[in-house]
Amino acid sequence: MNVFLNTIFNGIIAGSWLAATAVGFVVLWKSTKVFNFAQSYFMLLGTYLFATLDAKYAWPLALIAAAGITVIIAVLCHWLFMRNLVGASLFIPVIATFGIGTLLEGAVGLFWGPDDRQVSVPLYNIHYRVGDVHISGAQLSGLCITAVWIVVVILFLRKSKVGLQMRATAENHSLAGLAGMPVRSILVLAWAIAGASAAIAGITYTQQQGIESFDLANVGLLAFPAIIMGGLESVEGAVLGGLAIGLVDAFVITYWDPNAQFAAGYLVLFLFLLLKPQGLFGERVYDRV
Amino acid sequence: MEIQITGNTGLFRWRRCLHGLAVLSALLIATTACGTSSNPSGTNSANGTLTGSAYKIGVPCALSGPDANQDLPIVHGMETYAYYANHHGGINGHPVQILTDDSQADVATESADYKKELSEGALAIASCNSSAVAANVSYFNSNKVPVVSTSTVSSWYAPGANYSYIFSVSPSNEELAPLMVAYIKKALGANQGGGKVARLVDSIASAVALAQSWSQVGSGLSFSSTQSIPSTQTDYSSTATSVLGQHPIAMMTALTPVQQAPFDLALQNQGGWTQPWIGIFSAGDTDLKDAPSTYAALRYWETPTESAPSAKALYALALKAGYASSTDLESFWFSAGWVEAGAIITAMESCKGTCTSQGVDTGLENLNSNFLGITAQSRTTPTNHIILNSARVYAWDSSTSSAQPLSNFINLDPAPTSYTGKIAGQAS
Amino acid sequence: MTGRTRGRVVVRVEDLHVSYGGADAVAGLTVEVSAGEVVTIVGINGAGKTSALRGIVGFARGEPGRVTRGVVSVSGRRIPPNSPQASVRAGIRMVPERDKVFSSLTVEENFLASSPKREGRGFISRGLELFPELGRRRRAKAGLLSGGEKQMLAVAIALAADPDLLLVDELSLGLAPAIVTRLMKDLRDRCLELNLALLLVEQNAVAAAAISDRMLAMQQGSIIAEEQLGPTKAAGPALHRLLSQLGGGVQDGAQLPSN
Amino acid sequence: MTVSRRGLKWVLCVLGLTAVVGVCDLSLSSYWLYTVNTGLLLAFGAIALTVLVGRVGLTSMAHVALLAVGGASAAVAAALVSSWALPFGSLIAAIAGTIAGAVAGLAALRLSHFYLALSSLALSYVVLYIFQRVQFNSSHSETGYSASASNIGPWAITGERAWLILLAVLLVIVVVLTRNVLKGYTGRAWMGLRDREIVARAQGINVAREKIIAFAATSAIVSVSGTLSAFHTGTVSVDQYDLSMVFQYYAIIILGGLGSVVGAVVASVLFSVVQAELGNVLTSLPTSMPLSNELSLREGSVIDVLMGLLIVGVLLFSRGRSRSFVPWARTKISVVSTQRFRSYRNAGRCRRGIGST
């Protein structure tokens, strides 16, 4: 087997779910200016929901249902908490997301307990061998699901009128209101997309692990390097950032030290913050002075 | 200006509420000062035959959070033991009572829990966290508290001046390593040619230490570099890739289920694993397929209002745990708890206030006569590989005045043929 | 377009109060604007002109200001306070003072985003025929437009929505005088043509006077004087009277016609 | 003036509490003293964070790393000079913490808000990884390094009572020093930074210098508290340093009131006491109550839930005062930096040196 090629493939797989969660994060950031530290806890929530539903129903059904419930809870968080913090100084909402994250972690721990749950692995018996690269059914399905979701989100933002209004609202809430855009429902929509992305990312990740555990909350923190690398403002950037960090991850694990993967990922983040804070695809500022 | 700055949020805008909080905390202090001890889950001394005062065992382990999947089974084992003992006349008529506290795998919290449980009348402590025990050695010594730990710190076996109150129920790394090496050689059988033995461990300190203490495999074999897998690892395929890339002819792992399952999966995805493979598991580990049912049973039982059927179910489990066979998957992670509980009970019994290692070790011998089936266990991975779980109990041998393994507590020798395929009666 | 009859009162604002948490920025504004009429509010900085316009539209949640009292009714129907969406639905559009376009969107996208439900291309073409020169820049990012073009775009969007009442805040701000007069004239023509009510807020009283039917002087949040501006001849003295009410505070006093 | 009087009142309140608990009331178990001590140890970090976030308007998630640094220096000190372990360890910690803080401060010159938080998070990951590498390749990998020799020359700090007195004294020193600094020029400069960096710059405040000072000082405090708690628990092991500790500190400073030093102290002790007592309350819940079993078992999760609700709740509660887009409403704002909601893009542009409008 060819270690190098396999590592690249593994990196892409890891990158796919990182990208998915990063996309949700960026959409939320752009339209609400909330830097959501709770994103990985939404992943956790979605995954536990999935594990529960997965025991009863077919996994695609469980996936959709789990994502749906996560969306509802994300929207609730917006409705109960974040909505009322709009306009507070920038870091207040961030601290609030700390709170939401802790709340979610606690709630999951309380209702589901600490046991690790086994989830059904899709296409368990299928693996392909493309040249020297091994591809499992789970990886394939994960790749497809995340890819489809990302494409859907991007197309929605690019083509649909609501997506356009979302971008407009992201730039200027007051003007959007004056132009008669449904600003409130747009914010809700942003949270919904964020929640769904988190759930989908978490679930596809878990399906490739075959087991779901509490540490997912920490795992999700790898999305931040991806987001910063992509430049926080650009969905496409988030996707590329996710893939890049996934590759870094895979190579660190294969060739260096599995314990260093977080240190490595965040080292990348740190370098970007210092050298290129606007990231690879940071927003260009269209303003004539 | 400054008034406003300090004045607008939190406590200072809460001056009314603060009084409330103060009252609340005062109330809380009062409640404990009055000595209302927590009503621990899993004490059912409702049995009329039990006279004497309850033997209380403090069990500060992680009941919630990421580490709980390691510690819970120990707690369950202890509680099962208490249940079992209390339904068999207790310890000389004394009911056994387990005081659980959620240490959240945090040393400071667990240290506080020790003190709390002792203030609640605990006679002994069963710990899940070797760092916490290490941090409190002097405290245990000064208070003469017998402490039983699942840790693998070898220096704790031979009762020395420092560790006279600390007893471990699992084998030390140094003793385990040669056994495993011997086991691998045996498993490899004829083809003992040159080659690498892959070595994977959980990134928790004790597992890493375990790996470090593994000596040379010998006879042309050598270890590949140790890979310690953090439980938060995002990508197990890469680990599998790098392991398979080294083309090892055998593998030794000390992983948790959270790491084991995805690793197995990843191995399978990349062509699978057919060579000998030894896995050492912490007490917490269990076959994932069985976990839900077992936990369900225990959960029922933990509810203080215990309904007849669930009690029956648990009694059955307890019996099963008492007479575990070496291929019984559920039994092992009861047994770890049972060993601890048994060790502690007998320790307390022979201690009676002035606890000495001598007393506890004779206690362990009693334990030996009381218990069967505390032994190395095997489980099958999702890819049908036999993983050997290993656990041993040491006892004080007064003749050689040294720590000796209790002979019938070790079983490291299933037939090499059982490395591939399934065990009989093993659902896969 | 719609059956707006010339001279019928379109919007009636009664006793409007706007507050930013402290003292009222607008304390009891009462004004009527009828179809085809152009009314201008002048006043020194911080007099509350902008707040008055924003108050008429209302503030969204999370925005600093609040309408604390008063009623705004469009052709009889009173609209709920503090809900820009409702105001827009009721036919009020506003061109704010700055940040009047979405810089990161193209001209077309600006139109599209601000278009009402079930309206898209038609909206764009309608807007572009109001200011044909925007057509050339339709693919350009709005942030890269000149100040005049931005203003045109904003006005075009507002007009294309065919509102009953159009509020324009500081049309002249930061624009070359030539462009200002031209924009003003265009705006005036469009209003007469579409027969809609126009409420301006201006620093440049002279330029505004050229197109306004009525002019209100605002100070410390309330209207202190009002003048009908007839044909240009009478306009001069009237304007003078009005501005003198405001005291020397208006720099435009210097530019008063000397006749 | 009134503030300082109120502050003194609080200091006395805390002192009185500790005095009562520690000295007079001998009936209290060492468990209680331990709980209070844990709270006091939390207080150091909380003070540092509340000053940094509430007064300087900077953010940090580096507490874990700094505590680890403190722990490491405790281990080193215990190994080298057991007789003077405590002061020596604290000294090393202070120096190391100052350096680390200065580095973080350099990042703060370029970054703000969550960018800053993320950079400090990165710092934490790197430090913890190095720590892990060192420990796991040492002979101490299993139980961590021992830090039991908590000696100050002839005196050995043993027993919770001794610790209580030591911590109370140190804490009062830190509180008084911090309050004086905050009242002095530096404090005003920091608040200037927090409220409007541009203006502060215009007023001739050396922004870079002040930021670095703020980071260095607070980091030093945190590291020293790391040393103290290492000696208090008696061992130093990398797996004790969990990144989620940061959230705990944020919960505390939110409860105490952002920017309020004494509030942080009170909140820390309260936090520790409640956390310790929660178990008993939960286990004594009526079993008829839904979830009572889970509640009584999963104390940690319950604490998380409460912490989360606390953070969000207090923020919403104090929201009325902290809402503002507009400059002239700024004076009303009580919490952290008062950057306008939409003006982030401008801030971003400044940061990127593209030049602001």
Image (tube, coloured by chain):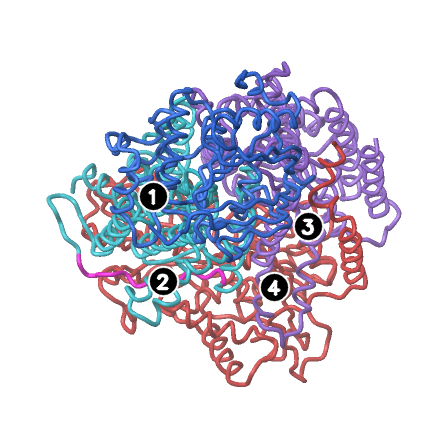
Chain colours: A cyan, B red, C blue, D purple
Residue A162 screen position, x and y as percent: 34, 50
Q: Depth-wise, is mark 1 or mark 4 nearer the camera?
A: 1
In the picture provided, is D120 more to the left or to the right than B115? left
In this rendered view, identify the residue nearer to me: C140 or B306: C140
Work out how far the residue at label 1 is from the one at label 2, CA to CA, in angstroms.
Answer: 58 Å
Q: Earlier in the sequence, mark 3 or mark 4?
A: 3
Residues under numbered marks 3 and 1 in contact, where contact means CB atoms less than 8 Å apart? no
Q: Please provide the residue range marked out in magenta.
A: A113-126
Work out how far the residue at label 3 is from the one at label 1, CA to CA, in angstroms.
Answer: 83 Å
Work out how far the residue at label 2 is from the one at label 3, CA to CA, in angstroms.
Answer: 40 Å
| Amino acid marked by disc 1 | Ala
Residue that protrudes farthest toward the top in the picture? D204
Q: Which residue is mark 4?
A: B363
Residue A191 screen position, x and y as percent: 43, 51
Residue that protrudes farthest toward the left in the picture? A131
Labels 3 and 4 in the same subunit = yes
Q: Which residue is mark 1?
A: C160
Residue B123 screen position, x and y as percent: 69, 62
- Identify the secondary structure beneath mark 4: helix
Query: Height in image: C10 above or below D290?
Result: above
Labels 3 and 1 in the same subunit = no
| Amino acid marked by disc 4 | Gly
Q: Which residue is mark 2?
A: A118
Q: Residue at x 44, y 49 (%)?
A: C88
Q: Depth-wise, is mark 3 or mark 1 nearer the camera?
A: 1
- Identify the secondary structure beneath mark 2: strand
In this rendered view, identify the residue nearer to me: D190 or D279: D190
Residue B398 seen anywhere in this rendered image of the structure: no
Query: Height in image: B284 above or below D37?
Result: below
